[in-house]
Image: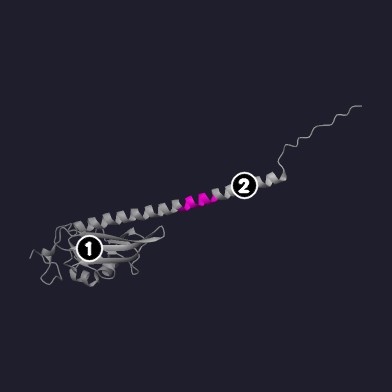
Amino acid sequence: MISIRPKHNFNGFTLVELLVALSVTGIVLAAVATLAYALGNLNDSTNDTSQKQAQVRYATLRISELLKNGKLICGTADNDVAIWRADDNSDAKINPGELVYLEAGSSRNYLKLLEFPAVTSPIVALSNILSGTAKASLISSYDERRITMIPVCSNVQFVVTPAPPYTKFVTVSFNLVEDGATRRYEITGALRGWAGNLLSTDGSSIVSDDD
């Protein structure tokens, strides 16, 4: 009597081969995860740097235009620079809507513009701006608008040459952390239409006509 036995397929993976395959797969997956994490960090760093560079470009444009068209640097009290940006109504006087403050904050950790839009009267005395008392009075009396140029920075410094109200050159400098490194930036501008001819002899007020 002839018996027929079924054939068994012994071509599958052995336990050792499976373990080796799992080990290799684990190494590959770990490498892929590490690469993805590194690329994610690089992308975040690139985005952060690009955002801060855009802020610097915006601040440079706004401040340069403000200084180029400005008439007087009226004071530098309380980490601010007060600028008579233009004589909109041609009255040869400083009105609230014509006054702009560059603000650094008490900790010198941001850069903002403070304005009082659409306020055409009364006249703001230059002496009050020079002494630093005008700002608080304007804020309590009128609606202000703040425009953030650099939201987070450090060591903001304003250098004016010579002292207000005779200033013709202004330098704004600040530190920014980009990709873990601190960089120092400077924005420099000059008053092209300096209205020194409207200053009184002692420089404490604006006179009604040219000296």
- What residue lies at 49% left-to-right and 52% top-to-bottom? 38
- How far apart marks 1 and 2 lie (CA) works out to 63 Å
Q: Which residues are magenta?
A: 33-41
Q: Position of residue 165 (x, y in %)?
A: 17, 67
Dominant secondary structure of the residues highlighted in magenta in the image: helix
Instruction: Name the quadrant containing residue 162.
Output: bottom left
- What residue lies at 29% left-to-right and 62% top-to-bottom? 114
Q: Position of residue 163 (x, y in %)?
A: 19, 69
**Viewer-proximal residue, 29 or 19?**
19
Residue 37 forms part of the magenta stretch: yes
Density class for disc 2 (Cα within 10 Å; few <14, some 14-19, many ≥20) is: few
Residue at numbered disc 2: 24
Q: Quadrant of the N terminus?
A: top right
SS assignment at label 2: helix
SS assignment at label 1: strand
- What residue lies at 34% left-to-right and 54% top-to-bottom? 53
Q: Position of residue 205 (x, y in %)?
A: 15, 69
Residue at numbered disc 1: 170
Q: Position of residue 132 (x, y in %)?
A: 24, 71
Q: Is residue 27 left or right of residue 177?
A: right
Q: Residue furthest left?
A: 211
From what the image shows, is residue 79 above or below residue 69? below
Which amino acid type corresponds to the residue marked 1 in the rendered image?
Val
Residue 182 in view (yes/no): yes
- What residue lies at 29% left-to-right and 66% top-to-bottom? 157
Residue 95 in view (yes/no): no
Q: Earlier in the sequence, mark 1 or mark 2?
A: 2
- Visual colour scheme: one colour
